Image (spheres, rainbow, N blue to C red):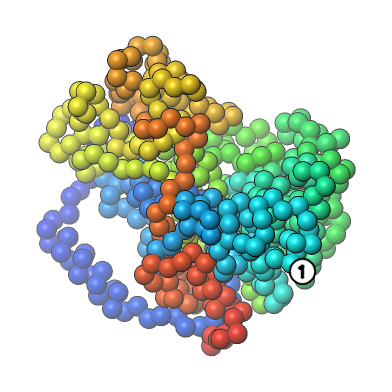
Amino acid sequence: MSSILTTGVVQAAEPTPEDWFDAGRQTVIDAEHLNPNERRAKNVILFVGDGMGVSTITASRIYDGQQKGGHGEENSLSFEKFPYLALSKTYSVDQQTPDSAPTMTAMVTGVKTIGDSISVDQDVEHSEPDANKINANALKTILEKAKEQGLSVGVVSTARITHATPAATYAHTSNRDWEGDSDKPAGATVPDIASQLVDFDIDGGINVALGGGRTRFIPKTATDPEYGVAGKRKDGRDLTAEWVSKHQNAQYVWNKDQFNAIDPKTTDHLLGLFEPSHVHYEADRVAHDKAGEPSLTEMTVKALDILKKNKKGYFLMVEGGRIDHAHHSGNAYRALTDTQQLAAAVQTAAEKTSAKDTLIIVTADHSHVFTIGGYPQRGNPILGLTQGVGSDLPDVDLLGLPYTTLNYANGTGYTGKSDLQPEGSKSFNATDGSWSSGSEGHNPKSFEPATGRPTLTNDLVQNSNYLQEAIIPLAAETHAAEDVAIFARGPKAHLFHGVMEQNVIYHVMARALGFDKHGSGKGAGK
């Protein structure tokens, strides 16, 4: 049985009026002592919380703080302490609300493009099969430019390593879904994304690639070593074996023990694929992974230890990819705990590097239709029922029914009857990522059929598998169009300011690394 997450309102010492005033004053004093770092960056680390909108950050901050024993609202995630901040406009060339392919393309190439496109410009039609047209309109990525300058490069994700966000750093294609050769239509000559990762040949190839997606790398005649499912490649290539054979000091790993055994001092190229598809949510990783897999923080540390051997520097992209997937499932708990893990990875990276020579950026590709509402009292459990100041009972709606602070505008948590779902609350299935009606210990038939809204209890809504209520019934919750945040520290971090187009992120990284022709800084790390 899944655990109940929290019970009751968390109590913590309350600051005095003098404490509030002094803390605010100190913040201003600290800001007066900020000095922009005009140096050239030796290293750049780009963290992307896929789907990590501002509401997700706020809810995760509160959840994290409550897990630590505080009210929650006063807490800060690691990257919220970075000194520079901006907002990013996420629309693509043809989408008001975007998907991850054009948004990540904008961040790593400096150019906005159309939906589903991976590092090709807007002149390439969707699902264009001709490799010549793809090559003619390919956009060079910051990872490719880093390799051309002799830097080491790495890509880390909790999604499939061929998924849209990580793929945009190294691949070029007109359809994000062409992750393996069996995903492409007949006659398409553009290489699949998995093969582009292994065939990447600039200055010796990619140094580190860690994530999920094994089946796109092994042939159909091979069996996955962990679950016994067949591979998906129809061309017969074993890309995992090719990775080891084509690179010097190269290793391929697929489980935690193998990963832990990797010595960064003797490994220059590491491919780690820990699941046939996406890796597990952080909340499920230990209990549900058959052979064990590293956390996002552990993958980040291993990547940094390999990349930092290069005296010229490195570029590393780290994605918390499953924040997005949890939101699509309508499960706030896993979205918040995966955001919590991303913040831990950022904290570790900040501790392992110096702000003098390493630019760290934390942002999102897009947001989700995820809301924080009602008038809950301070310290009210963020995953619980909304309870107002001075009340002993949960707040109720016009039907006299309690409701939660966190909700979705659309998705699988719709509690009324639809063509897809029966009436009543819905729960998440951690085994396969699906939803089902009812929750442990609760019979959906007991809910009021006249309203479609159930009588919620804290035991129900604070269960880790509960799906928050949604207004519009959809098979999956959708992205949202509002701006997302950019947090930064290190060389050139001060260039992030105001409300910016998303493609500006690339140009800040390029300026910091000295890749743009208009300026290269004053010397790396000096």
Question: In the figure, 160 relative to 38: above or below?
Answer: above
Visible residue check, residue 218? no
Residue 474 image point, x, y percent? 47, 32
Would residue 399 be found to the left or right of residue 294 on screen?
left
Would residue 184 be found to the left or right of residue 146 on screen?
right
Residue 405 image point, x, y percent? 29, 37
| Residue closest to the eye, 297 or 520 | 520
Would residue 167 be found to the left or right of residue 131 on screen?
left
Question: In the figure, 146 relative to 450: above or below?
Answer: below
Q: Quadrant of residue 142?
A: bottom right
Question: In the figure, 508 relative to 290: above or below?
Answer: below
| Label 1 neighbour load within 10 Å: few <14, some 14-19, many 20+ | some
Question: What residue is rendered at 48% in x and 57% in y?
Answer: 91
Q: Circle 1 sits in a helix, a strand or a loop, which is it?
A: helix
| Residue closest to the eye, 520 or 28 | 520
Question: What residue is rendered at 50% in x and 45% in y?
Answer: 324
Visible residue check, residue 88? yes
| Residue closest to the eye, 229 or 54 | 54
Q: Quadrant of residue 458?
A: top left
Residue 348 image point, x, y percent? 51, 59
Question: What residue is rendered at 58% in x and 39% in y?
Answer: 280
Residue 49 image point, x, y percent? 50, 53
Question: What residue is rendered at 18% in x and 50% in y?
Answer: 14
Q: Inspect the image, locate mark 1, and give the three-letter code of the amino acid beneath it.
A: Ile
Residue at label 1? Answer: 202
Q: Quadrant of residue 399?
A: top left
Would residue 514 be found to the left or right of residue 356 on screen?
right
| Residue closest to the eye, 171 or 7 | 171
